[in-house]
Image (cartoon, rainbow, N blue to C red):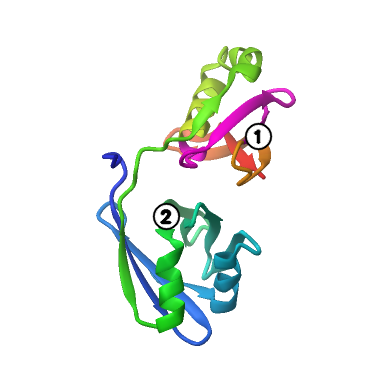
C-alpha cells in the first residue's frame, strides 16, 4: 500500500569503470545532484559482505543496507550557508538488488520509480512501558519519542522490541538482525528561532 504522505522518488542510475552514480527527483524537494559510489564497494554490498555501506560525497551522506534482496538507501542531502549552518533533508528509498546488479553487468543507464509503502515494522514496547510512562510526563520528551518511533523504525516486515536502557534512553532488538540491536538515545541541542536560541531534545538511533 502506497504511503500518501511521502512522495514518489525517481532515481536515475548510471555506471562507469569506477563509480555508480545515483541521483534523485521528487516533487517536494526537486532534483538532487549525483551521488558517486565506488563500484567495488557497491559489489560488496550486493554480495552481503559487508551488508551496510556508509559514504559521503560533496558534503552529502548516504547509508546503504542490503536486506531481503533490496537495497535500503538513506540520503542526507545537505547545503551549507555562509554562517556555517547546515540545512537539508533526508530521503529513504528502496531499490531491488537486481536493478543494481544489471546496471553493473551491462553499464546501461536506468531509471527506477520508488513508490513508498506504509511501514510494516511491528514495535513491541511492552518491556519499556514503565520508562515510556516516565518519558510521557514531559510534553517535550513525549513528542521527541513519538517522532523517533514514527521516523526511524521503518524496516518492512520486521519486529522490534523496545527495552529501557538508562534514564530516558532505550535499547532495542530486531527479529531480522538487520540491525541486530541498538540504542534509541535522547540528545539535547539548540535551534535558532525568531525569538532566539532555544533548547531542543531529540532521539537518535545508534547501532
Q: Quadrant of residue 141?
A: top right
Q: Quadrant of residue 186?
A: top right
Q: Position of residue 105 (x, y in %)?
A: 45, 81
Q: Is residue 185 visible?
A: no
- Most foreground residue, 194 or 188: 188
Image quadrant containing the N terminus: top left
Mark 2 highlights which residue?
94
Residue found farthest to the right: 166
Q: Is residue 120 visible?
A: yes
Q: Secondary structure at mark 2?
A: strand
Q: Secondary structure at mark 1?
A: strand
Q: How many marks?
A: 2
First to last magenta residue range = 151-174
Give the alpha-carbon distance from disc 1 to disc 2, as whole Å: 22 Å
- State whether residue 106 is above or below residue 122: below
- Crowd around label 2: few <14 · some 14–19 · many ≥20 (10 Å): some
- State whether residue 197 is above or below residue 27: above
Q: Name the residue: 38% across, 72% down.
A: 13
Q: Is residue 83 left or right of residue 95?
A: right
- Crowd around label 1: few <14 · some 14–19 · many ≥20 (10 Å): some
Q: Quadrant of residue 198?
A: top right
Residue found farthest to the bottom: 17
- Most foreground residue, 1 or 14: 1
Magenta-span inclusion, residue 162 = yes
Q: Position of residue 115 (x, y in %)?
A: 30, 51
- Most foreground residue, 87 or 43: 43
Q: Position of residue 42 (x, y in %)?
A: 55, 71
Q: Find residue 173 and name its label.
A: 1
Q: Position of residue 3 (x, y in %)?
A: 30, 40
Q: Name the residue: 47% across, 39% down.
A: 157
- State whether residue 168 is above or below residue 97: above
Q: Is residue 150 left or right of residue 161?
A: left
Amino acid at each position: 500500500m502506497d504511503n500518501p504522505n511521502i512522495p514518489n522518488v525517481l532515481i536515475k542510475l548510471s555506471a562507469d569503470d569506477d563509480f555508480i552514480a545515483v541521483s534523485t527527483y521528487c516533487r517536494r524537494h526537486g532534483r538532487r545532484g549525483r551521488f558517486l559510489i565506488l563500484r567495488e564497494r557497491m559489489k560488496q554490498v550486493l554480495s552481503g559482505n559487508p551488508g551496510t555501506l556508509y559514504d559521503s560525497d560533496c558534503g552529502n551522506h548516504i547509508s546503504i543496507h542490503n536486506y531481503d534482496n533490496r537495497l535500503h538507501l538513506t540520503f542526507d542531502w545537505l547545503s551549507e550557508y555562509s554562517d556555517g549552518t547546515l540545512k537539508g533533508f533526508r530521503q529513504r528509498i528502496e531499490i531491488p538488488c537486481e536493478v543494481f546488479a544489471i546496471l553493473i553487468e551491462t553499464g546501461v543507464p536506468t531509471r527506477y520509480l520508488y513508490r513508498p509503502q506504509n511501514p510494516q515494522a511491528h514495535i513491541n514496547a511492552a518491556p519499556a512501558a514503565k520508562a515510556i510512562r516516565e518519558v510521557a510526563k514531559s510534553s517535550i520528551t513525549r513528542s521527541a519519542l513519538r517522532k523517533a518511533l514514527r521516523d526511524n523504525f521503518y524496516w518492512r516486515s520486521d519486529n522490534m522490541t523496545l527495552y529501557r536502557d538508562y534514564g530516558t534512553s532505550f535499547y532495542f532488538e530486531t527479529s531480522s538482525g538487520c540491525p541486530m540491536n541498538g540504542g534509541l538515545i535522547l540528545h539535547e541541542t539548540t535551534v535558532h528561532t525568531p525569538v532566539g536560541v532555544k533548547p531542543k531534545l531529540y532521539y537518535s538511533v545508534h547501532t
